Structure formats: C-alpha cells, structure tokens
Image (cartoon, rainbow, N blue to C red):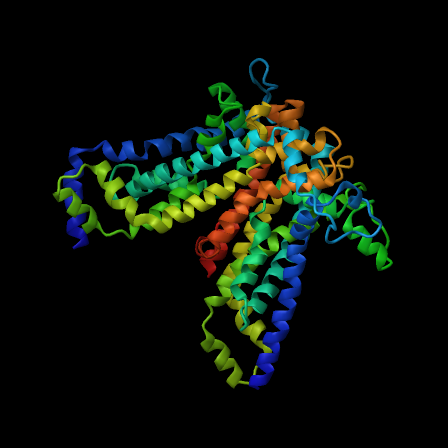
Amino acid sequence: MQLSSVKKNNTRLNRNKFLPYLFIAPNMLLFLTFMIIPIIFTFTMSFTKWTLIGTPEFNGISNYVKLLSDKQFLAAMLNTVYYTLATVPTTLALGLIGAIALNRNMPLRGALRGIFYIPTVVSLVATGLIWQWILSTDYGVLNYVLEAVGIGEQQWLTSNALSMPSVILATIWVRCGYCMVIYLGGLQGISQDYYEAAEIDGAGDMKKFKYITWPLLRSTTVFLTVMSIIYGFMGFDLFYTMTGGGPGFSSTVMVHYIYKQAFQVGEMGYASAGGVVLFLIIFILTLLQMKGDDQQ
Amino acid sequence: MIKKEVLKDRIAFILLLLAAMVTLFPLFWMLSTALKPSEDLFAKVPILFPSNPQWSNFAEIFSMAPFARYFLNSGIVATVSVLLTVFINLLAGYTFAKYRFRGRKVLFLIVLSTLMIPMQIIMVPNFIILSKLGWLNSYAGLIIPRAAEAFGLFLSKQFMDEIPYELIEAARIDGESEFKIFVKIILPNCKPLIAILSIFTFMWRWNDFLWPLITTSDKDMYTVQLGLASFVGQFYVEWNSLMAISLLAIIPVLIVFLMFQKLIVQGIVTTGIKG
C-alpha cells in the first residue's frame, strides 16, 4: 500500500519538480546564512587579523600561537574545566538520587517533579540576580546562615577563591532538575521484572542498584554527561550577570573571554580562533556520545 | 517486607519535600525581597515575610527604566519567533518526510550534523553577517536568524514520517494544491508537534540573553533579559526593585511552564532536548 503511494507521489511530483525545493527554501536559506556560512566563516576568520575596520589580513596560524601563550585565555580554559568538573558530577549524582527517590510510591509525585524542573525554565539572567542577592556579602541570606552556624561570613562574589564556587552553586540549582527528569525517564524504561527476579534471589537495594539500575541507565548517563559537559563549556549568562568574569579574571570562562575579545577589544580574528577551539571540543564530545550510543 | 517498602517510600517522600523546599527557596526569597520596604533589606536578621508588603515596588520599577518597552520587545520577539519557527520548520519537515527529491538525504544530514553546535561558537561571524545585512538593533535581527533550528526541523520530520500517505493522496484526488494540503490537512494533524515546538521556542526566545546581547545596543530594542542585565550595572539599584523586576521577567515563562508542565517534561524525556 505504502509502496504504491510512494510511486504515485513520484509520478505526480515529476510535474512539480521545484515544489519541494520551494517548500524547504525558507528553512534552508536561513540555515545556510546563519549556521553553515558562520561555521565556515569562523574557521577562515581564525587565520586572519581583523578588527572590523578595513579588510581582514591573512596571518596564518599566529592567532592559534597567540592563544597558546595568552595567559588569560589559558586561565579561562582552566576556569571552564573547573566549572565543568565541579558541576557535571554533582548535578548528575543529585539528579540520579532525586530520580530514584521520586520513582517510588508517593503522593504529589507530579507536583514534586514540576517543582524540581522549575529552575531550568527560569532565565539565567534572573537566576544570576537571585543568587547574587542570596550570596551578597553583607546582607545575603546565605552569609547570615553561615554566621549563625559558626562558619562565618564569606566573600562569595567578591573574592578570587569563591567567585567560581558561587556560579557553580547557582548552576547546580539550575541543572539538577533537568538531570532528574531525564534520569526519571530512564528509570521508567527499566522493566520491573528485573527487580522482582533480583528480589527472589534476595538482592538488597545496593545490589539492585549496582547490577540492574546503574548498568541499564548507562546510555542515559552517557547522554547526560555529554550534554552537561557541553553546557559547562558554553557557560556564559550566569558568569556575565553574577561576577562579570571577576574579580580580576578569577571567573572568566572561555565563551566570556571570546565575547570580550570580539565585542570589547574588537579582535574578530583572534576571537574566532577561540571559537574554533570550542568547536573542536564540542565535536570530540559529540563523537564520544555517538560512540557511547553505538556500544549500547 | 511490605512494611519496609512503605517506610522507604515515606523516607523518600520526606527527603524530596525537603529538597523541594531548598529548590523553591530562591524563588520564594525573590518574591519576599520584591515586597519588602527598603529598610527591611538591611535588617540584621533576614525577614522572611515582609510585615508590610510593598506591592508598589512592582509599579515603581517601570519609572526607573523603560521596562514596559522591554516587555513589549520580548513579547514581539517571542511571539513572532514562535509563528515563524513553527511554520518554516513544519513545512520543511513535511517536505523532507513526504517528498522525494534530489539532494534530500544530503541536505537533511547537513542540517542534522549541526544539531549540537551551540550559538556561542558562531556568535562572532553571525554578528558580522547581521551588521552587513543592517539587521543589528532590529526585530528582524532578533527573530529571523534563530528561526531555522536543526532541532525544530528534526522533530518535525520525525513527526511527519508517521503521517499516513493516504491522507495526502485523498486530498490530491480531490484536486487540492500541494500548499493547501499542507495547511488544511497536515497542520491540523500536527497539534502535539505544534504545541511542543511553540512552547519551547517561546521559552527559549523569552530567556535568550547572548543573542540579543551581541545584536542589540540600542536601548529601544532591548529585550527584558537585556534590560535586566543592564539595569544592574548602570546605577545603584536596591535589591527589592531588582527582585521585583526579575520576578516579572520570569512570570511569562513560569505561566507557560505551569500550564504545559506535563507536555514539557514528556517532550524533554522523549527528545532529550537541552533544558
């Protein structure tokens, strides 16, 4: 039935050969202009010196050489790695624990799941402001609590040591719900039969987790890890609103540094080289994810 | 045995209630701060519930910065983006699913391969392209470049693959034009797809920060997020005003989320969309 329809389609469509192209044209045109060309453009620009005034000058790989010796860029890379390493395991672990708990019998399940997801839909600019207020040194509510329990006031956003942890804290608040919802979807895909069989064998909760839940959630974990690492490497909004990258360069991450080079210093070629580095990181991560999927 | 499981359920429930309170606290604190009179902000012991809620704080911020204009801009950008994104992605998704034409597979693969490429990587060239087009500081620049998304096209094609050919054939026999078939037959059969794509597009465009930041410098074209971010840096603003405007800025998305919570969560689980 379907085959004959396809055939019929073909004969009919031979008469309007251009129609499909017309239908995809708006999409393809935008896609070409604002995705494909910019990707190519990022690569070509990265081999030039260009400050928007005049024409780009080819300068070979000197932007890349400069990146490798640019202490601020290397510091931004380290901050990005720090940010990613601190946020990915914590949000995944909290998300998994939350999902396992929520997968049990209880009232208000839907409402709880909704509450945990709310931070994900709040704009990052607003999130940044809320946390800036919570973490404020003199009148912030967190410092009040820390003072009350005897830990004492901390210079959250205004010290080199704590500016990164401040943004990390806000990020954990933002991302846990996302990880939890994805893990919950994964958990609900696991057949109850496995657990019943394990119970007959007398397996406890830890054993069930180790031998059933964790292995069967592997592809979910791989997916979440890759998505969260990419999220970490693309971090910008929270840094921009909470710390502005400071104090000094203590919380400047890669995207923020590229942004500053392009739109504050005006070094378009140099900023593009930074963009290419990010592109390669994403590319490798995507390949890893695909490899993880294949093994499944 | 059964009793033990029930006990565990209860413990899980209590732990989750505590976690929910921690999750909601920043939002509660935002509301509480927004309603405080200025002197409450600097109380030695933080005041959880303002004794004398100042609802006028919400009105005052509109006289401190042109937030009415920013809300209008964000509203226009988010709404038009939804219409444009849904229309062009569904039309293209339908074409990729139901027509056979030369280059079909290659084109779709090219689009798909960019699914993971975030805006951050291509912000510099996009800024230059927009300036050449004269689209900086314009609705066109805020809306059009973001309309063709690999995600939207991918989702649309997947959905359209499931629509039976018989539906299209029947309309063809009735002599309908191909475009009319799309509008009158296909679109009404795609309500779940249209819903999910509209909801996500609205939330993404409303919350978008980096794109408006690089393409907009004229204050008249600021979106809410941009206005919010620049409001902080400009001059000394008290936290009750800042929390009041932050709260207003997140309300449209919160309403959409609360209305379509189930659909959104399902959409995220089945498609694994970025949050």
Counting from the top left corner in percent of width and height, residue A125 is at 63, 40
Nearest the viewer among A55 and B172 is B172
Farthest residue toward the front?
B52
Residue B98 in the figure: left or right of residue B214: left
The residue sitting at 64% across, 74% down in the picture is B11
Counting from the top left corner in percent of width and height, residue A129 is at 68, 42
The residue sitting at 63% across, 31% down in the picture is A259
Nearest the viewer among A43 and B249 is B249
- Specify the quadrant of the image occupied by residue B111: top left
- Specify the quadrant of the image occupied by residue A157: top right
The residue sitting at 58% across, 57% down in the picture is A115
Badge count: 0
Nearest the viewer among B251 and B162 is B251
Residue B98 in the figure: left or right of residue B131: left
- Specify the quadrant of the image occupied by residue B103: top left
Counting from the top left corner in percent of width and height, residue A272 is at 58, 29
The residue sitting at 49% across, 19% down in the picture is B134
Residue A109 visible? The answer is yes
Residue A204 visible? The answer is no
Residue B35 in the figure: left or right of residue A48: right
Counting from the top left corner in percent of width and height, residue B68 is at 57, 31
Q: Is residue B85 above or below residue A218?
A: above
Farthest residue toward the top?
A54
Image quarter in which the N terminus of chain B is found: bottom right
